[in-house]
Image (spheres, rainbow, N blue to C red):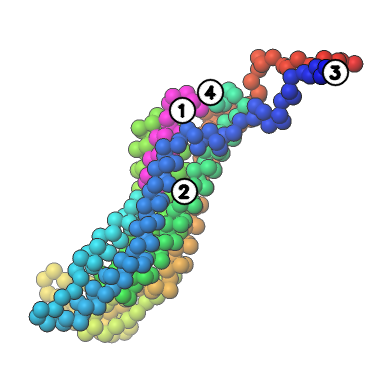
């Protein structure tokens, strides 16, 4: 008995369909490996800062405070410096992530593909420009959000482990510590991704897009720091003249209190300060206490995410101007259809 002749295997339903997400990961494999390595290195560093390094530094400061100027008193200075140095390096690196993301997005993710023609080649296949851009925004955004979110959480744990135990620990309102401790760095990283994408679409050149994306992200970071003290209602404390001003938190404004109770700015006393301060009875200081940490974090992060959304919208508008209506590209033509199996005709 002979087997019945069979025709060519029918194509799978998903055969020929593009896998844009897989293309993005394969095309930017070096950046993916570099990102994974950076996240892993920072994770190990922050876990060490939360555990053994914080314990060693706290013990070193305890012995130092116990010495109180006594002779022949030893303490572990190396542990204190080791904790301080690694904390500073990790915090600065975490603050630099939005700039790295923006530079990569502008230079490699979009700018280089448009400059080399890789993007237009993809558009002539079965991937529409809109889907091409959506995938290039969504896949990196997921990776950036996952990695940066993890690092911000670990940084907050590391800072909490040293708070009140390590005398050299940064205050919560330190500009670099504040951003690294919450979702503001995550929001800035996503905004950097959107800024790099828009720069690449507008300039279509690798190096100019990289530079512009980094500058835009830096401007957004600067605007965030300027607006931060005014994004949540602050508290005002009044103190007598002999105690001076200065609230325990993020400083907003300060001045003097007159005999009538009015709050006025600090006088400019370049010549006779005694006469300039003669009519005042106290100081006033407007600041944010530690209880405002999360309100400031969430408000700032929400505003930065809103800016990121506007940049994403601008990216799609720039792509529409570059390619026309964002319709799905037709399937490639010219491919002969498979012959029908024998006996299939009616």
Residue found 31% across the figure and 71% down from its top: 55
CB-based contact (under 8 Å), mark 1 and mark 3:
no
x then y, percent, for residue 166: 28, 72
Q: Which of marks 4 and 1 is in front?
A: 4
Precedes in sequence: disc 2 or disc 3: 3
x then y, percent, for residue 24: 51, 35
Residue 326 visible to an observer of this rendering: yes
Name the residue that disc number 4 marks.
Answer: 121
Which residue is at the front of the view, 334 or 105?
334
Name the residue that disc number 3 marks.
Answer: 1
Name the residue that disc number 1 marks.
Answer: 114
Q: In this view, does 188 lie above or below 266?
A: above
Name the residue that disc number 2 marks.
Answer: 144
Precedes in sequence: disc 1 or disc 3: 3
Query: How packed is label 1: few (under 14 Cα within 10 Å), some, or many (20 or more)?
Result: some
Q: Marks 1 and 3, how far apart in space?
A: 60 Å
Q: Does the magenta stretch include residue 27?
A: no
Precedes in sequence: disc 4 or disc 3: 3
Which residue is at the front of the view, 161 or 7?
7
Q: Marks 4 and 3, how far apart in space?
A: 51 Å
């Amino acid at each position: 008995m002979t087997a019945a002749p069979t025709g060519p295997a029918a194509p799978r339903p998903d055969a020929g369909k593009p896998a844009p997400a897989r293309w993005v990961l394969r095309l930017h494999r070096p950046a993916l490996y570099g990102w994974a390595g950076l996240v892993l290195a920072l994770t190990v560093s922050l876990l060490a800062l939360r555990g053994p390094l914080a314990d060693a530094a706290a013990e070193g400061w305890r012995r130092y405070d116990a010495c109180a100027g006594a002779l022949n008193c030893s303490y572990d200075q190396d542990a204190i410096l080791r904790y301080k140095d690694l904390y500073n390096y990790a915090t600065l690196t975490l603050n630099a992530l939005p700039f790295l993301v923006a530079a990569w997005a502008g230079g490699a993710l979009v700018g280089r593909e448009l400059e080399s023609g890789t993007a237009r080649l993809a558009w002539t296949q079965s991937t529409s420009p809109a889907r091409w851009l959506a995938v290039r925004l969504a896949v990196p955004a997921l990776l950036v959000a996952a990695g940066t979110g993890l690092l911000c959480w670990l940084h907050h744990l590391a800072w909490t482990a040293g708070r009140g135990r390590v005398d050299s620990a940064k205050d919560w309102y330190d500009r670099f510590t504040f951003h690294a401790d919450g979702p503001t760095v995550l929001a800035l990283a996503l905004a950097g991704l959107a800024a790099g994408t828009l720069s690449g679409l507008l300039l279509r050149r690798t190096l100019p897009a990289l530079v512009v994306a980094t500058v835009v992200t830096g401007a957004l970071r600067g605007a965030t720091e300027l607006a931060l003290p005014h994004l949540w209602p602050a508290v005002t404390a009044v103190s007598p003249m002999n105690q001076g001003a200065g609230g325990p938190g993020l400083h907003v404004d300060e001045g003097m209190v007159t005999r009538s109770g009015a709050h006025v700015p600090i006088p400019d006393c370049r010549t006779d300060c005694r006469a300039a301060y003669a009519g005042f009875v106290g100081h006033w200081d407007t600041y944010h206490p530690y209880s405002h940490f999360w309100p400031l974090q969430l408000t700032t992060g929400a505003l930065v995410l809103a800016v990121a959304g506007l940049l994403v919208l601008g990216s799609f508008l720039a792509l529409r101007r570059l390619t026309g209506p964002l319709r799905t590209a037709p399937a490639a033509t010219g491919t002969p259809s498979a012959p029908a199996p024998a006996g299939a005709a009616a």
